[in-house]
Structures are given as structure tokens and as C-alpha cells.
Amino acid sequence: EPEVTQTPSHQVTQMGQEVILRCVPISNHLYFYWYRQILGQKVEFLVSFYNNEISEKSEIFDDQFSVERPDGSNFTLKIRSTKLEDSAMYFCASSDLQETQYFGPGTRLLVL
Amino acid sequence: QKEVEQNSGPLSVPEGAIASLNCTYSDRGSQSFFWYRQYSGKSPELIMFIYSNGDKEDGRFTAQLNKASQYVSLLIRDSQPSDSATYLCAVQGSGGGADGLTFGKGTHLIIQP
């Protein structure tokens, strides 16, 4: 069964450093998303992406964040200058026209 | 501000009984409603989705939607210990696939053997 994959599974970085989180959505899906979940808190929407552009973004998705689909399979989230409060689990998701979103296993980001 | 409310629990249910999970949402324009299961340290796993008022059944799971009351529920019949997890209610707006999901904090369900 097709699934969303994410790399790396864990990332440790120093405050102020740039990180890139990578995702491979399900191959025939058209919509791509990033969410985050701070430990003990709810899953929060960051951004949705369709047809090579951002469709919607939340207040969390400020200028420090960017997304890109560099090729036909990868979807990336870049955080330019990480802060301590960026420490969270980051989930990628994808959906087809049926709008049902399937989540990847996540990347656990720790900012020191 | 879109809000999704769930009782955080824990909700403790004996094995074999029916577990009932509830969710309310604030945005009347919401069109699509989802239940995800999340085990500790893992990603959300889709259980069911519902778009229309009424009931939708899939195996041991039944989702119920009442848009007038802005209320969604999930029933789990014949509860098993493996059903012990946090259940997340998620709501999507009228923008369809372009819209992100708004999640509740989740209900922690414990099935007692």
C-alpha cells in the first residue's frame, strides 16, 4: 500500500541553523501539507501546496518557513533560522482529489 | 478562529464494550470531518471520514455527523486493547483539498482487558 515517507526521522540542530525536512508524498496525490505537533499538544496545520504553489498557510508559517517541490517526487519544508520553540514533530501529508489526507511517520526536530 | 473541541480523557472502557468519542467544532462552513488514531510517538492514522449528516459505518467503527449541532462522534464497537490510543477529530473547511485540517487535542482512550 502506498505511503508517505519522511526523512530524516530525527534531526538535532543548533538554534539559528537552517534545517530542511524532506517528504515523498503518495505518487498520484495532488495536495501536499505540512503539520507540526509540539510535545503534548495538538497537531497544527502549517501549509498546503497544490500545483506548485502554496494554497493556504497558517499564522505559524511565517517568513522563517518555506516549502518547495524541487522535483517530481520530493516535497520539502525549510526552516531558515531555527528557534527553540520550533522543536516539534513535523508531519507531511498528502491527498488526492478525494481530500482524505494521509500522514507520513514524521520528523522529530530538536533545537538546542 | 476555527476551533475543534474534544474531551481529553482518559476515557476508560472495558474490552468488548462500545467506546463513544465526541467532538464539536466552531466553523459552520466546515465541510469534511475526519477521525484519526494516534499512538504515542506516532503519526495520525486515518480511521474514518464523513461529509454528510447521519451515520457512516466501517467495520467496528461508526462516525456520526450533525451539522446543525456542529457535532461529530465516533463509536467503536467490540473495543479491543489494541484500540487504546488517542483519537483525533479533524475538520476541513469549504476550500476542499486546499484547506488544512484543524485538529482537536484528542481523546485518550484506554481499553481495559
Image (cartoon, helix red, strand yellow):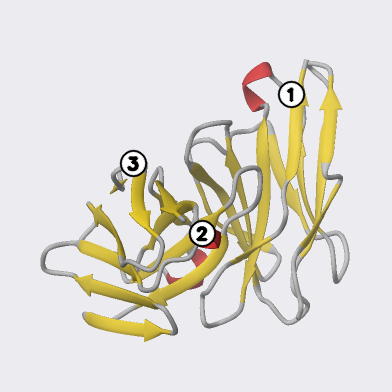
**Left or right side of B88 for B52:** left
Protein chain holding label 1: A
- The residue closer to the viewer here, A5 or B12, is B12
**Left or right side of B99 for A4:** right
Q: Disc 2 designates what residue?
A: B81
Q: Disc 1 designates what residue?
A: A82
Q: How crowded is mark 2: few (under 14 residues within 10 Å), some or many (20 or more)?
A: some
Residue B56's place in the image compared with B88, above or below, is: below
Report which quarter residue B49 is drawn in: bottom left
Q: Can residue A81 be seen in this view?
A: no
Q: At label 3, which amino acid type do we have?
A: Gly
Q: Do labels 3 and 1 share a chain?
A: no
Q: At label 1, which amino acid type do we have?
A: Thr
Q: At label 2, which amino acid type do we have?
A: Pro
Pinpoint residue B46: horizontal percent, then vertical percent.
Answer: 54, 68
Of all residues, the one furthest to the left in this rendering is: B68
